[in-house]
Image (cartoon, rainbow, N blue to C red):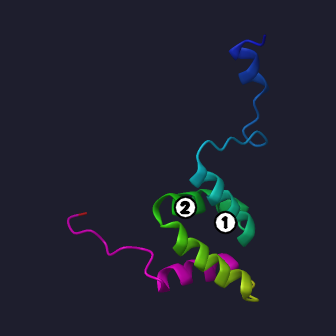
């Protein structure tokens, strides 16, 4: 049996990816489909905070288009669908 020290010494954060929640998995999926793997943390956050049907509708819209900047089109579509709530007062 390996010790924790041995496991941590072999752990490479750039290659060993751990996804423990479903929304994280969907966020990584969005980033891959949109060709923006470098911004996967943004898509994970969106998957956590924005309802899934809205994200799926925006993704379908982008995939059906011939856009070069799919990430930008995705964010525009989310804004058009009012996925982002009104800013809260007092913050």
- Above-or-below relation of 81 to 5: below
Q: Position of residue 71 (x, y in %)?
A: 65, 75
Asked whether the beta carbons under mark 1 and mark 2 sit within 8 Å of each other, the answer is yes
Q: Magenta residues?
A: 69-90
Q: Position of residue 63 (x, y in %)?
A: 72, 81
Mark number displayed over residue 47: 2
Helix or strand or loop: what does disc 1 sit on?
Answer: helix
Mark number displayed over residue 30: 1
Helix or strand or loop: what does disc 2 sit on?
Answer: helix
Q: Position of residue 87 (x, y in %)?
A: 31, 72
Horizontal side of 13 relative to 91 (left or right) equals: right
> What count of labels does the image hold?
2
Q: Using a 10 Å C-alpha cutoff, classify the residue at mark 2 as few (fewer than 14 neighbours), some (14 to 19) or many (20 or more).
A: many
* Among the two numbered marks 1 and 2 on one chain, the one whose residue lies closer to the N terminus: 1
Residue at 60 percent across and 51 percent down: it is 22
Closer to the camera in the image, 55 or 91: 55
Residue at 67 percent across and 65 percent down: it is 30
Q: Is residue 45 magenta?
A: no
- Above-or-below relation of 44 to 34: above
In three-dimensional space, the C-alpha distance between marks 1 and 2, rounded to whole angstroms, equals 9 Å
Closer to the camera in the image, 4 or 9: 4
């Amino acid at each position: 049996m390996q010790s924790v020290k041995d496991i941590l010494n072999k752990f490479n954060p750039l290659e060993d990816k751990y996804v423990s929640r479903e929304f994280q998995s969907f966020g990584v999926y969005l980033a891959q489909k949109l060709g923006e793997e470098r911004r996967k943390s943004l898509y994970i956050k969106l998957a956590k905070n924005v309802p899934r049907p809205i994200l799926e509708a925006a993704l379908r819209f982008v995939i059906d288009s011939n856009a070069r900047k799919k990430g930008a089109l995705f964010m525009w579509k989310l804004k058009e669908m009012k996925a982002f709530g009104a800013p809260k007062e007092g913050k």
